[in-house]
Image (cartoon, rainbow, N blue to C red):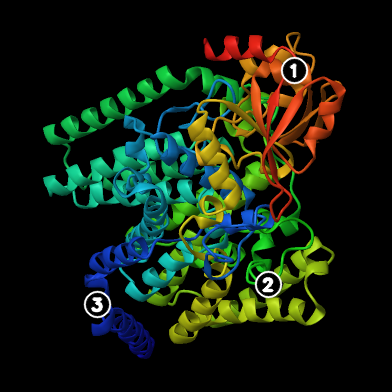
Amino acid sequence: MEKQTRSARRDKSRQDKSRQVEKEQTHPFLDIFLKLRYLIGLLVIVIVVTFNLNGSSIGSWDTYVSQRDDGKETDVIFGQNREVRSDEWLVQTPFYLSQAETGYPVINEDYSLNGQNMIIAYNSPVKDITVIGKPFNWGFFFLGRDRGLSFYWAMKLVVMVLLGFELLMILTKRNKPLSLIGAFALTFAPAVQWWFMQHVGDLIFFTIGLMVAFYHYFYQHEKKWLRALMMLLVVIFGIGFILVIYPAHQVMLAYLLVFYFIGLLIYYRKKIKWDWFDAVLITAALLFIGVVMWHFWSISKDALMAALNTLYPGNRVSTGGKFKFSEFFYFLTNWKISFEDISFSNNSEVALFYHFFPTVLLASPFVLFGKKDGDRKIIGRILMIFCLFTIFWITVGLSRTMAQLTLLSFVPPFRAILTFSFAACLLSIWFIAYIWKHDVIPTWYKFVLLIANAGIYYYALQGSKMEGYFSEIELISVIALGTLLLAFALFRQRVLFYLSFSALIIASGFFVNPVVQGTGAIFEKTLAKEIQRIDQQDPGQLWLTEDELYNFTPTLGVKSFNTVRFYPDKAAWQLIDPEGEYERFYNRYAHTRAFIAKEDTAFKLDRPDMFSVTLNFDDAEKLGIKYVVTKRPLDDYNQRNEAQFTKLYGPDDDGHMIFEVAYPNYATWQTQTTGQ
C-alpha cells in the first residue's frame, strides 16, 4: 500500500510537471504572436522588398571593381561581405541578375558562344514551367531585377521559419516555445546561412516543406481541401527538390524523406481510409510532376548529360567509409566563424547544424524504447534509424557496386555529415521535447550523460584541426558551455535553455550574411556602365574579360567567352581544340580565367573547379572575340602588325581598360560572324 502511495505521488508529480509544460506553451503573448505569424511573415517580406534589401555578398566585387558613379562606397548596411561565399556572389547571384537582363531564357546566350542551360545553372529564374518548383524565384517576374533579389532572400527566410515551426510542432507534439526557437535554429543554422543560395539552402527548404506536407496529408486526412493543399505543396516542393541537381546532398535527403514517409504510412495505415479523392490527387500530382520532369529532360538532356559526364564533379564515385571523428563535431566551431575565419578550411565547409546526437543515442534505452507514449516515438525512431544509416555510410561504406545501385556513390562522406547533422538536429529537438514531457531518464544517468558529452567534446577537439583554431580558454569554454546547454535541457531548465540556445543561434547564424541595399556593387560601377554602353552600340559581340572578372560581363547582359559554366561549351572549344587534346582542362564545372596574347594557346588547371586559358590571336579570332576587358596595355601589341587593339575606356581607378580588337583578316572575320 505504501509503495502504491509513493507511486501515485510520483505519477501526480509528473502530471503536474506536464501540465506546467502545457501552461508554459500557451502563454498569451506567444499565442497572439503565433496566431499572427503568417501576417507577420508577409509584413517582413513587404518591408524587405520595399527597402530593396538582400543578403548577398556581391559587395565582394568592390575588391576587383571599385569605381562607381553614384558616390557610394558600399551598399552594405549591416554585417560584412563574405568573399569565401564565392558560389553566391561570384556565381549564383550573377546568374540570377544576368537572367533578369536577358528576359529569363532557359538558354542564356551570354554564357560562351552557345549559351548555358540556366535551369541546371543553380536553377536560375527562367520563364518556363519548371520555375513552379522555385517559389522564391517568382518575384523576379513581377518585381524586376533588384527587388526580385530582395523577394528571393525575404521569402526564403520567412517561409523557412514558418515551415520549420510547423515541422517542429509535429516533432514536439505542439511545444510552441521550443518549436519557435527550433525553427530559427534550422533557418539560421550555419549550414543553411553559409550555403543559403546554394544547394543546401534549397534542399533543406524543400525537405522541411515535404515533411510538413506529408504529415498533414495523413493527419488532416478528413479535410479534403487541406489534403488538396498539401498535395499542391508536394508538387511544388517535389519539383524544386528534384531540380536542385546536387546529388551529394540530394540523395541522402531523399533517403530521409523515404524513411519518414514509410514511417507515416506504417503509423497511419489503420487510422485513415483511402478514398477516390486520394486516387485523384495522387494520380494528378504524379502526372504533373512527370510531365514537368519530361519537359525538363526534353529541353535539358544534352546539358544534363554534359554536366554528369564532366571530369569534375560528374565522374567522382564514392564508396563511403572515409571520415575523421572530429569532422562530426565541426559545429563546435560555428559560433566563432562569423567573427573569425576558420584556420584549416573555409567557413562554408565546416558549417553544420547543432545537435546532441551522442546524448540521444546514449539515452535511447530510456527514450526510444518502452510503451510509454508510443505514438510520440514514431518520428524519433525514424530519425534515429536514418542517423545510424548515415553514420554507417560515413564510417563503414559499401562496395562500389552497392554504392552505385543505392545511388550513394554520389555522396562523399564529408557531405553526408552535413545531412546527418540536419537529421540529428531534428532528433535532438524531438528528444528535448520528449524528456520535458516525460521525465524518463534517471537523475544519476543524466550526470553520466553530461560527463560523456564533455568527454566526447574533449576527444573530438583534442589533437584535431579545431585545436589550432581555438585558444586554450576557448577550448575549455566550448566543452563547458556546450555541456551546460545540455544540462539545461536534461534538467528541464527551460528558460535558461531558451536564453542560451537563442544566444547561440544569433551568434552562429545572424551575422553570416550582410544586409545589403540593391545591386549597385555591380550595376553602379563605371566599368559596368561603359561595358553596357558599348554593347548597346554594338550588340551581340563576344567579350573576353581577363583575370578575375570572368563572370562580371555576363551579369550585365553581355555575351562573354569566359564565364562560370556548369558544363563545357564543347562546340566552342572544338574551334581551337578539334582533337580534344586539352579536354581534361575544360570538361568540368569550371570558373574560366582567360587572357589574350601573342604566345601559343596554353591551358592551366588552377584547382578542380577553375582553369586558365591564354588564347593566341589566331584562336581568339576563331572564337570571334571582339572586346577585351583587361588591366594590361594590349595596344603594345599594335606595333607588331598582328592583332590591333583600340582602347575604348580606361584605365579607371582599378586599372581596368576596354579594348576593341581587330585581326589581320578582320574584314573577312567580320563578314563571317555578322553575315554582312
From the viewer's perspective, is the residue at label 3 or at label 2 nearer?
A: 3
Q: Looking at the image, which is closer to me, 676 or 593? A: 676
Residue at the spot 33% in from the left edge and 26% down from the top edge: 292
528 shown above or below 274? below
Label 3: few (<14), some or many (≥20) within 10 Å?
Answer: some
Residue 96 at what x, y percent from top left? 47, 43
Q: Position of residue 240 (x, y in %)?
A: 39, 39
Residue 534 place in picture, x, y as percent: 55, 36
Q: Position of residue 215 (x, y in %)?
A: 30, 50
Q: Amino acid at mark 2?
A: Ala
Q: Disc 1 and disc 2: Cα gap in Å?
A: 65 Å
- Circle 1 is placed at which residue position? 619
Residue 31's disc number: 3
Residue type of the residue flagged with mark 1: Asp
- Mark 3 → mark 2, Cα distance in angstroms: 38 Å
Q: Which residue is mark 2?
A: 452
Check the image and report above or below for 570 versus 75.
above
Q: Is residue 120 visible?
A: no
Q: Secondary structure at mark 2?
A: helix
Amino acid beneath label 3? Asp
Q: Residue at x 45, y 74 (%)?
A: 440
